Image: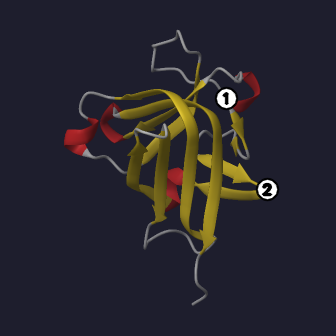
């Protein structure tokens, strides 16, 4: 999977061009859009109103292109969780969701795995994923 970011060593943050974004404490999943015809997935994370003042962005978006694997936990749509507990990587044939690989162990074939509250999850692989962010307005 080609990407323009890394999953930080703490498994709760993402680093894009020397910028760190804490998905666990500062952001919640606010939108998931699946493009079936063009095999795209967009995950949009919005900054919590209570986020720390150091949170530099108001929105963080991950755009997956040419998705070839997507799996949601059984209760994901019913519960619609927004709080990311941790995220990392899984080998395609590894379905033990209790353990995630860190960035340094991930291969291009690895799935990106997002664990949410109550063990709900999104597991995805695509040819590429691009992270973008919108800066928070100055107060």
Q: Name the residue at 34% across, 34% down.
A: 120
* Residue found 55% across the figure and 69% down from its top: 52
Helix, strand or loop at label 2? It is loop
Q: Depth-wise, is mark 2 or mark 1 nearer the camera?
A: 2
Residue 111 as seen in the image, left or right of residue 80: right
Which of the numbered marks, if any, corresponds to residue 102?
A: 1
Q: Position of residue 122 (x, y in %)?
A: 42, 34
Quadrant, the C terminus: bottom right
Of 38 and 84, nearer the camera is 38
Q: CA distance from mark 2 to mark 1?
A: 18 Å
In the image, 105: left or right of 22? right
| 42 versus 137 height, above or below | above
Q: Nearer the viewer, residue 36 or 136?
A: 36
Query: Which residue lies at the image location 73% right of the left edge and 22% below the top edge?
Result: 105
Whichever of labels 2 and 1 marks the residue nearer the N terminus, that label is: 2
The answer to which of 102 and 133 lies nearer the viewer is 133
Q: Is residue 137 left or right of residue 1?
A: left
Q: Residue at point 46% right, 14% down? A: 96
Q: Which mark is residue 17?
A: 2
> Would you call the spot at circle 2 few (<14 residues within 10 Å), some (14-19), or many (20 or more)?
few
């Amino acid at each position: 999977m080609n990407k323009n970011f890394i999953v930080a060593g703490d498994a709760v943050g993402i680093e894009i061009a020397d910028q760190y974004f804490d998905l666990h404490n500062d952001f919640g999943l606010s939108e998931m859009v699946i493009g079936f015809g063009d095999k795209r997935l967009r995950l949009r994370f919005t900054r919590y109103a209570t986020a720390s003042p150091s949170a530099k962005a108001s929105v963080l978006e991950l755009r997956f292109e040419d998705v070839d694997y997507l799996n949601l936990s059984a209760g994901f749509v019913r519960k619609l969780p927004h709080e990311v507990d941790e995220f990392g990587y899984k080998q395609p044939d590894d379905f033990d969701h209790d353990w995630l690989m860190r960035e340094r162990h991930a291969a291009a074939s690895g799935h990106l795995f997002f664990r949410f509250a109550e063990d709900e999850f999104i597991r995805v692989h695509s040819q590429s994923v691009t992270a973008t962010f919108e800066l928070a307005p100055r107060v």
